[in-house]
Structure formats: structure tokens, C-alpha cells
Image: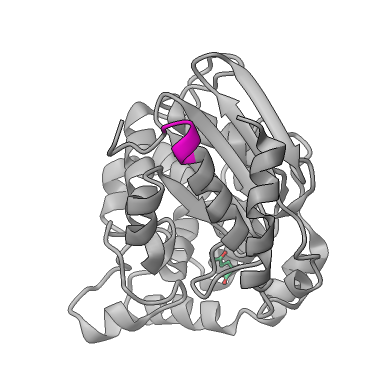
Amino acid sequence: MNLNDAIQECWSKIDEGQVATYIPALAKVDPYQLGVYLFDVTNDKKAEAGASQVRFAIESVSKVITLLYAIERLGLSAVEEQVGTRQTGFPFDTILNMEITKETHPLNAFINSGAILISSLIEEQDGLSPFDQILEFSRKICNDPAITLNEEIYQSELRTGDMNRSLAYYLKAKEVLTNDVTLSLDTYFKQCSMMVTCQSLANLGAVLANDGIAPWNNERIISSEAATYTKSVMMTTGLYNESGTYSVRIGVPTKSGVGGGLVSASPNHYGIGIFSPALDHAGNSVAGLALLELISKKLKLDVFRY
Ligand code: DON
């Protein structure tokens, strides 16, 4: 498959979306960018095209990394006690499910309330703050030592993060979030402000696709159990309330971020990283998802079909 042709084919989709404006630093990003990096884990082959090496804010894709790190640190059952595995049917910053149902915990790890709760579980260790540990783990699982925090985006998240603060304080009031709220929010804002490329996300996807083993050096980074759990949750909630639609159209576990990033893990086949900053109404990259759909069809990646 020619990736440059695929990018050309999806380019006009950019006009159907808009860059995230609720975080001012993201509003300044040029929407006319589309990049892809493919990591074929069975044949150890890589391919890339377009804006594949441009750095962008990882945003909600970081929730995958933090979830994996929390599972490694605390064990899957401890994490499963904190968050469910269900879609909410509401936007990613919803609090509604806990208000209108008898649920005491966030419905999944990828809505903001669930992700903040997961970040709160990571405690200082060996003098490293929770964020320092997440950064170190991100560099390892993305095989990208150049991942750093973007101070401008972090400050922008801090200034406009009141909805996230309300979610965290709500969880504290309900005695669900029991660690320091300010520190938990700070960890969350910082993890969202890490700068990655399509290549970093393809490497993350490749570890997930390869059952937790890094295909670049055969080191096991996460347990098979953590990889399986996370891929399943990506499939059911990774694209928020659009997850069902894309499960049918694409059929590959995927997680989005409002920076325009997508990470996909096609089990035993590919890790895929995609970037295009114009988003649909649910906060998912429009051209990115069109490109992923094309790639999934061309490479026959749909887990329900092949
Ligand atoms: O907390 C927020 O709203 C952002 N920092 C991240 C949200 C996000 O990426 C949702 N994903 N599509």
C-alpha cells in the first residue's frame, strides 16, 4: 500500500473537522497536517508518510500509557476496583454517569474522570514524582527518549482545566479519589502535555499488538494480561461515544487524543500512529480516522473480519 496516496485520499477530510479550541495552546496548531507511521510487528518492517515526525501533544492517548503503568505498579485487580469497562454515551469529560446512576466509580479508564482517578493511584517512588515515572515509562514504551513536557501546553491545560478539577473534587467528595487531589490533577495535566510523534505512538501500539513485548529488542515491557485488557478497553471506549461506530468501520483497538493523535494496536500485526489535528464533534481526529479506516481495509486488519 502506498501511504502517500492514502494521505492524499484522506486529505480533504481535514476540512470536516476543527482543531481543539478549549485548550488555547492547541488552537494554534495548523490543521492541515496528516501523518502516519506503521510498525509491522511480525516482519519487523516500518513505513511512514506525511507529518509522521511532527511533534504534537499526546493528550488523551496518554491515558493508555498511564493505565498500563498503573496496572504494572498495582496489578490489574486493583485497577479494576477503581474503573469499569463500559461506554458512557456522553462526552469524555462527563460526570453524569456517576450522578444519574448508582455507579460509585468512573465507567472506564479513558473518560477524564476515570483517567484522573488512574493517575491519582500512582504514588511517588524512589524520589520520582508520579509524572516523572509516567514520563520515564512513556519514553520506554514509545521507544522515544525525546518525549518531553511542553510547558506552554501544560500551562494552557492548567488555566482551562476547571472541568477536570470539578471531576477530581467530585471523586474526592465521594471518597473514590483518596490521594492528594492537587497532585493527581497536576500529574494528569502534565501527562496530557507530553510531546510525541506518529512514530512514538506506533511503537506504543506495536508493544500492545505484540502481547506486551517490545518488538525492537524483545523485552517484555508490560504483562500479556495488561496488553489484552487495554486493547479491549481501547476497542470499547477508546473513541468515546463513537467507539461502536468505529468498531464496525475499522475494527482495530484505537485510542484518540484532542491533540489529533491516534494509536492503534492490530493484534499480532501492526502498531499504528496517526496524527491530524482537526477533530470531529466527539474529539477524534477526522482525517486520522479516515486514514485508519483505509489502512485497516487495505491491510485487512479488522479483528472481527479476518
Ligand atoms: O483533559 C482534557 O480535556 C485534555 N487534556 C485531554 C482530552 C482528550 O484528549 C480527549 N480525547 N479525545
State the residue at coordinates (26%, 45%): 77
The image shows residue 141 at horizontal and vertical percentages of 58, 33
- Which of the two residues, 171 or 208, is positioned nearer the viewer here? 208
Residue 80 position (above or below residue 125): below
Farthest residue to the left: give it: 102
State the residue at coordinates (48%, 52%): 255
Residue 13 position (above or below residue 273): below
Q: Quadrant of ligand 1?
A: bottom right
Assign the magenta stretch its main secondary structure.
helix
Q: With 206 as the anchor, is 139 left or right in this view? A: right
In the rendered image, the quadrant that contains the N terminus is top right
State the residue at coordinates (67%, 81%): 160
Q: Quadrant of residue 15?
A: bottom right
- Which of the two residues, 57 or 69, is positioned nearer the viewer here? 57
In the rendered image, the quadrant that contains the C terminus is top left
The image shows residue 265 at horizontal and vertical percentages of 46, 37
Q: Does the image show residue 135?
A: no
Q: Does the image show residue 1?
A: yes
Q: Please give the range of residues in magenta.
A: 296-300
The image shows residue 85 at horizontal and vertical percentages of 28, 56
The image shows residue 14 at horizontal and vertical percentages of 67, 64
Q: Is residue 269 magenta?
A: no
State the residue at coordinates (79%, 58%): 150
Which color scheme did the rendering employ for the protein? one colour
- Which of the two residues, 304 or 201, is positioned nearer the viewer here? 304
